[in-house]
Every structure is written in C-alpha cells, then in structure tokens.
Image (cartoon, rainbow, N blue to C red):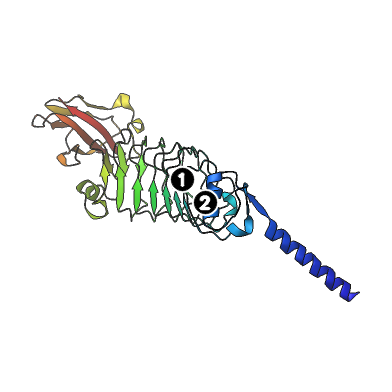
Amino acid sequence: MKTKLLYLSFVISVLFLNYSNAQQTFVPDDVLEQYLIDQGYDTVLDDYVLTNNIINITEIDLGAKGVSDLTGIEDFTALLTLDISENTLLNSLNINSNTALINLNAWNTSISNINLNNNTALEYLNIYNTLITDLDVSNNTSLDYISIASTSINQLNITNNTLLHYLNVSNTNLTNLDVTNSASLDFLLANNTPNLGCITVLDEIAATAGTGIYEDWEKDETTYYSESCNLSNSDFKTTEIYVGPNPIKDELHIVLNNNDVLKEVRLFDISGKQIIKSTNTTVFTNHLASGIYLVKITTNRGEFNLKLVKA
C-alpha cells in the first residue's frame, strides 16, 4: 500500500511538472513573437510561447519595431526594462503584473492611458508624445526620471516623488507645478507651457537667479517661480481689490480691502529679474520699458500674483 502511495505521488508530481512546462502564453502580435524567436525564447510563429521560457526575461527592446499589441506581456513577471518607443500603432499597455519594472520607455506611441499603481519599483518613465491625458505617479516613489513632454496632461502631482532628478513637462497644458518636495531635481524643462503661470519652489530667489539645483532649469519667460503659487486671484475678493491700470503707464495703484494689510510689492521682468521693491500702494513705473511684467503683492493673507503689461 505504501509503495502504491509513493508511486501515485510520483505520477502526480510528473504530471504537474509537465503541465507547468507546457503552460503557454498567448502572444497574438507577430512582431512581439518574432522578437522572442530571434532572442531564442520561442521557435514557431503560432501566437503562443511557453510561459516557462519568458518568466525570467528582464529586458525587452521593441523600439521602432512596429509592434501594435502587447497581449502576453503580463507573464513577463521578472521584467525590469521595457522599451516600446516609436511604435505609433500601439494604443494600449497593461503592466499591472510587471511589478518588478524599473525602466519604461513608451514615447512616441498612441497609448492613451496608463496605470502605474502596481509599478512601485519604477525609476524611469518616458511617455513623451503619447495620447495620455492623465497620469498618477503617487505610488511610484522611486522615480528618478519623468518625461510627459508633448502630451495633453494638464495636472501632475509629484508630491511623493522625492527622488526625482529629471522632469520634462515641455509642450504640455500644465496649469500649475509644485516641485517643493523634489529637492534633488537637477533638470526641469518647462518650455512652451503657455498655461503654466507659476512653478512652486523651495527657494524662489535661487530659482529666479538660476543658482544651485536650479542652474539647468528651463521655463518660458512668462512663467515665474514662487514659494507660494497656490494663492490665486480667486482667494481675494476681486470686487474689493484693485491693481492697475493694466496696461500700466506711469503709476501702478494697489487698493486693498479694509481687512488686508500691504506688506510688500515686487515687480519682475519676464526674465525673473526684480525691477522694483516697495511697500507703498502707489508704485512709479514711468521708467519701465514696454513689455510684460509680473507683480507680486504680499499681504497679511499671502501673495497676490498678477501679470501686467507696460504700454
């Protein structure tokens, strides 16, 4: 009886092993399967690959190879690097099961949405020139590099991404950007972002001067740095505040409501250089050249920021 039990256990083990070895992953895209054949992980172009052959693959480079369907990628559970850039026919990506992923290069594709909640090991993310309109990187605290350039993303919260060294938001519709938690951010590209009026920073003086970590930062001339961008015009009762005229000529007049106390008025040119600093409600501007300026009015309730035009 004991011998029979041992034999039965052996048979079951063999059957299980054979089943495991025979388990297949559906790979309908011929480009992806041919890549696996060329790499020695598959032999026949038949839409299937042995799962056991791919579970230990750590890198896939499909850049500009014409892939259009990544079905099956979920079984590449050891994947660390995935390059699918320059595949304009590729419009979807599911990497929820690729939890070990560190590098994702998906620029110049037709992908319109992406879920990175499970990819907590991710360090490099490039989705430049994609159709993605919304991005959540709150779980991706290891990110060192992010590029969302040339996308339609208009909001990006990087509060949890304290390890960032590179951020490219150029050619986007961002309306605000807070980088105060990214103390190691050596490179920030924010060119051609017409809706981005202010970037919140830890040190607006150093950022405006372009010193320290801000040395290699780039932005539009009409975008300014501040330590308190979050206070907008809507935080004040506009019917009780007057800043003008706009366009300005010889004088700028500031009238606050009875509960507000003026602390400081600072005027900057479009390069970020401070031109005027005053504590008066009337500021003489007759000496200014024509152009665009930024006025920062500090009160007991915070900062009021406004773009002005000198006629």
Q: Residue at x 47, y 44 (%)?
A: 136
Give the label on residue 84, or none: none
SS label for mark 1: loop
Q: Which quadrant of the figure has residue 70? A: top right
Name the N-terminal-most of marks 2 and 1.
2
- Between 166 and 294, the one nearer to me in the picture: 166
Question: Quadrant where the N terminus lies?
Answer: bottom right
Task: Give the residue number, with chain letter if any, for mark 1.
Answer: 65
Query: Type of residue at label 1?
Result: Lys
Q: Compute the Cα span from label 2 to label 1.
A: 9 Å
Work out whether residue 85 can be spotted. Answer: yes
Q: Mark 1 Cα within 10 Å, few/some/many (few <14, many 20+)?
A: some
Task: Give the residue number, with chain letter if any, for mark 2.
Answer: 35
Q: Position of residue 174 (x, y in %)?
A: 37, 37
| Left-right relation of 52 to 304 | right
- Between 244 and 229, the one nearer to me in the picture: 229
